């Protein structure tokens, strides 16, 4: 109902500030639900690690630290490029926006490819819990608990990365076709928040699964 | 991280310098996480790993996610998430520790 | 705003195609979509209950096989909890009224609102599929290890359905929070908000904080069921009780998702039909938030007889008692509002008064169950069944029906038959008590819930219960008839048929597509009824 006819203003908001604040609050509340969503898995992790510390330490040794570290680096880098993309979008720098979104998307893909090799290895040695389990350790069946949590946590996280890759891919195309002008920068910003959140989850998953009992 | 006082207009976000600095810090943090894991710190190793992770997370949230300049409502939302998480951890841990 | 032209434009006659309904982003139309779908599931769940209630007429359950019986009570529970009670008031009345009551043109995210309905339908479709394909026999709680390792029924697809439907409730919740924060009209301060809005705000907080934990829990349970993951599997070192923890982390707060909106509706009704400002407005407002907050600290009272630490049990028990405080604040304030009000007993008010009585009984029996020692005796008996039906049906459903009757003229622009409405309100109240009061007794005497057979000496209580549920069934079917009839033959409703206060009564019935034709500025408190000298 404000006098300026902003083409990016949705019909039910009074002005663009109200729209921006609503969208960003909405995104943060969505991230809040995501915190609780991953929280469930971390609850289970805490309890079982408390109950079976030795098994956790021993099983962690079977995860590939090199691949985990590279993947962490890839994700952290993609977070930087995403932040730069948001900045470029806000300044209306199209070329830079396309590059940064493209790099972020590519980093997500690299992450998933490395994850694929990690998973493939687990299928190969039989450390996938359930029917495919053939992994022999001194902890017997109990070891499946660790891998259930591992696949639960990294699987859910991987799913989030996949969704992020798709969304950022779409954004890249939109930006390339001039469909993401400065007035729509908030879209990039909101996707950025999501992407940083995915990064945050990994920042905790990495040391908790890959790096325990290494000494 | 007071590096973004200039250029923080309505639309320009943080200065790029802050982003690069945070990135550097994250990479150093990553190296530290891996390095610390291979040092025998006894029971301290997990708390230290978590402290490093939390520090990394803190900078991502504050600078990359612009929470440093966010409205109070967004701070409240984040705090609610942390409170919700801690409820789960506290009660569950109390249960399993007291059985 | 009361220009009654020949055919004033409103949200219903704005467009007539099927497409205009299925792709609508108007919160009012989405509320109607929800209303139709949750009514369908309500009657489906009710039918299941009626069939197994018939079966329970005889101690040896002559009507059904035990396996069918298990599937029916599970179907009843799953449908009623996840597809009816959780979305009931928020998704229908809330969707319709939250923007109007705060003076906004729509919810903050209209498309996400529509998406939430589609998610609900997708979740409902999964659950329906599971039922058609043979059903589930785990009970609505899906306790492991039975659900993950032993049950020979469609557990996985039901869990997927609940997972999806959970997201519809998350999206409703976060839409409401943002809307209430950011979309209030000028002058609509927090303490001018109707208590309906406060209740929905508290509900939405629970929806966004608790539902994701349920989502991840059923996700893990489904992984275990489908692929043999071992998070809750004792043979792999997992703890089945952890499932209960995570499940109740959501499902206890979920009880407040069901009852808080109803408490909000009743606040509106009591005030409107006493023609008085609600007594203790701020206390009632904050008690909603207090209930939501305390709701997160009490889930362990469902697990007193599990392996949960008894020390933690004591803590959970004490905190559970605390919930009685904000609940009582509400009831006392509602009752105090009646004092020296000019009370009129229209049908919505009958529901509201019924609500107060039944909610008190349901709440007080909750105290018995929150007490560690008595719970050992009462756990998993019909006493528990009766207790939560007093809250869920006597509370949440009475509030829903009361609210539906109160706002029906606003939603549809038609008046229903007040005579039949009063009769059905009476039938619901009588039938409800007849159904569930005997269950308190039979539960106290030791009849476990979910058992197909029971000792012959309990038969009288079960027969009473079944007879009551038949009366209750009529109480639910009659409104369908006269409400639908009102659409065709009902008198046109004026903008404010109850002469109630509130922004929704200042706009035409049914409201125009963007709710308000001009800018809205709020200048008075909620419930600004004229003060009478005593």
Image (tube, rainbow, N blue to C red):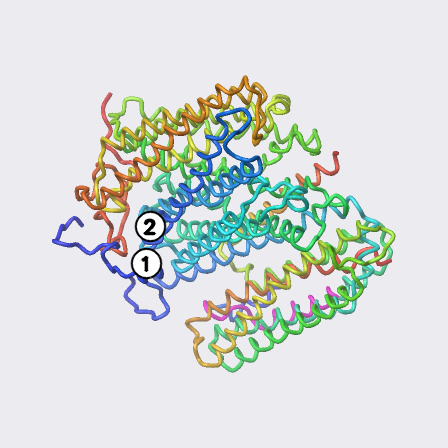
Dots 2 and 1: beta carbons under 8 Å? yes
Residue C92 percent coordinates (x, y): 37, 46
Q: Which is the main secondary structure of the residues drawn in magenta?
A: helix
Residue shown at 57% from the left, 27% from the top: C453
Q: Nearer the viewer, residue C337 or C473?
A: C473
Q: Nearer the viewer, residue C383 or C101?
A: C383
Residue C489 in magenta stretch: no
Q: Is residue C327 above or below residue C24?
A: above
Q: Is residue C454 above or below residue A69?
A: above
Q: Which residue is mark 2?
A: C32
Residue C294 seen in the current view: no
Dot placed on the residue nearer the N-terminal end, 2 or 1: 1
Residue A186 percent coordinates (x, y): 46, 67
Residue B21 in magenta stretch: yes
Q: Residue C432, located in which quarter of the rendered image?
A: top left
Q: Is residue C373 above or below residue A214?
A: above
């Amino acid at each position: 109902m404000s006098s300026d006819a902003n083409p990016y203003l949705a019909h039910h908001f009074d002005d663009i500030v109200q729209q921006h604040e609503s969208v960003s609050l909405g995104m943060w509340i969505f991230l809040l639900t995501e915190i609780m969503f991953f929280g469930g898995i971390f609850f289970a992790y805490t309890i079982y690690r408390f109950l079976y510390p030795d098994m956790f330490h021993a099983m962690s040794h079977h995860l590939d630290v090199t691949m985990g570290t590279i993947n962490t680096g890839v994700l952290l880098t993609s977070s930087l490029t995403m932040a730069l993309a948001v900045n470029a979008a806000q300044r209306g720098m199209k070329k830079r926006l396309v590059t940064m979104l493209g790099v972020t998307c590519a980093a997500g893909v690299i992450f998933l490819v490395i994850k694929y090799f990690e998973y493939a290895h687990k299928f190969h040695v039989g450390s996938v819990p359930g029917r495919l389990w053939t992994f022999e350790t001194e902890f017997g069946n109990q070891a499946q608990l660790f891998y259930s949590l591992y696949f639960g946590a990294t699987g859910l996280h991987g799913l989030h990365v996949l969704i992020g890759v798709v969304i950022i891919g779409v954004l890249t195309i939109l930006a390339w076709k001039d469909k993401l002008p400065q007035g729509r920068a908030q879209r990039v910003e909101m996707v950025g928040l999501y992407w940083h959140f995915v990064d945050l989850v990994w920042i905790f998953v990495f040391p908790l699964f890959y790096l325990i009992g290494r000494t | 991280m007071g590096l973004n006082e200039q250029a923080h207009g309505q639309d320009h976000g943080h200065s790029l310098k802050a982003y690069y600095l945070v990135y550097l810090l994250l990479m150093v943090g990553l190296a530290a996480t891996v390095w610390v894991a291979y040092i025998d710190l006894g029971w301290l190793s997990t708390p230290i790993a978590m402290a490093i992770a939390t520090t990394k997370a803190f900078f991502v949230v504050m600078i990359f996610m612009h929470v440093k300049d966010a409205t109070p409502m967004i701070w409240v939302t984040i705090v609610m998430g942390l409170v919700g998480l801690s409820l789960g951890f506290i009660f569950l841990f109390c249960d399993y520790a007291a059985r | 705003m009361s220009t009654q032209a020949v055919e004033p434009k409103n949200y219903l006659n704005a467009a007539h195609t099927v497409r205009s309904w299925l792709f609508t982003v108007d919160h009012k139309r989405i509320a109607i979509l929800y209303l139709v779908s949750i009514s369908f599931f309500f009657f489906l769940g009710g039918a299941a209950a009626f069939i197994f209630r018939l079966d329970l007429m005889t101690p040896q359950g002559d009507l059904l096989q035990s396996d069918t019986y298990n599937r029916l009570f599970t179907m009843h529970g799953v449908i009623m909890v996840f597809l009816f009670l959780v979305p009931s008031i928020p998704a229908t009345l809330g969707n319709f009224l939250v923007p109007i009551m705060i003076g906004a043109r729509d919810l903050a995210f209209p498309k996400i609102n529509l998406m939430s309905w589609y998610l609900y339908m997708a979740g409902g479709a999964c659950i329906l599929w599971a039922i058609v394909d043979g059903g589930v026999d785990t009970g609505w709680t899906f306790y492991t290890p039975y659900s993950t390792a032993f049950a020979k029924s469609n557990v996985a697809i039901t869990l997927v359905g609940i997972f999806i439907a959970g997201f519809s409730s998350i999206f409703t919740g976060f839409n409401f929070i943002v809307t209430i924060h950011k979309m209030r009209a000028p002058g609509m301060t927090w303490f001018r908000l109707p208590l309906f809005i406060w209740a929905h705000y508290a509900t939405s907080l629970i929806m966004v904080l608790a539902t994701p934990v349920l989502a991840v829990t059923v996700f893990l349970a489904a992984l275990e069921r489908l692929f043999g993951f071992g998070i809750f599997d004792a043979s792999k070192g997992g703890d089945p009780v952890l499932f209960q923890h995570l499940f109740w982390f959501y499902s206890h707060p979920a009880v407040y998702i069901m009852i808080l909106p109803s408490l909000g509706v009743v606040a509106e009704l009591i005030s409107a039909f006493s023609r008085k400002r609600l007594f203790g407005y701020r206390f009632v407002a904050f008690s909603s938030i207090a209930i939501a907050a305390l709701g997160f600290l009490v889930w362990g009272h469902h697990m007193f007889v599990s392996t949960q630490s008894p020390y933690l049990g004591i803590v959970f028990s004490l905190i559970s008692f605390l919930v009685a405080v904000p609940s009582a604040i509400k009831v006392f304030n509602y009752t105090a509002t009646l004092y020296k009000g000019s009370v009129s007993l229209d049908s919505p008010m009958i529901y509201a008064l019924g609500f107060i009585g039944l909610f008190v009984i349901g709440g007080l029996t909750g105290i018995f169950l929150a007490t560690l020692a008595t719970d050992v005796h009462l756990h998993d008996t019909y006493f528990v069944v009766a207790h939560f039906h007093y809250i869920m049906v006597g509370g949440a459903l009475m509030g829903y029906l009361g609210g539906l009757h109160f706002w029906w003229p606003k939603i549809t622009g038609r008046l229903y038959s007040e005579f039949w409405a009063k009769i059905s309100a009476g039938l619901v109240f009588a039938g409800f008590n007849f159904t569930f009061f005997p269950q308190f007794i039979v539960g106290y005497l030791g009849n476990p819930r979910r058992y197909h057979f029971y000792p012959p000496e309990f038969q009288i209580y079960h027969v009473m219960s079944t007879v009551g549920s038949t009366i209750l069934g009529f109480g639910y079917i009659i409104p369908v008839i006269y409400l639908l009839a009102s659409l065709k033959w009902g008198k046109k409703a004026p903008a404010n048929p109850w002469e109630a206060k509130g922004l929704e009564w200042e706009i035409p019935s049914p409201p125009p597509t963007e709710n308000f034709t001009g800018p809205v500025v709020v200048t008075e408190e909620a419930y600004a009824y004229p003060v009478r000298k005593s």
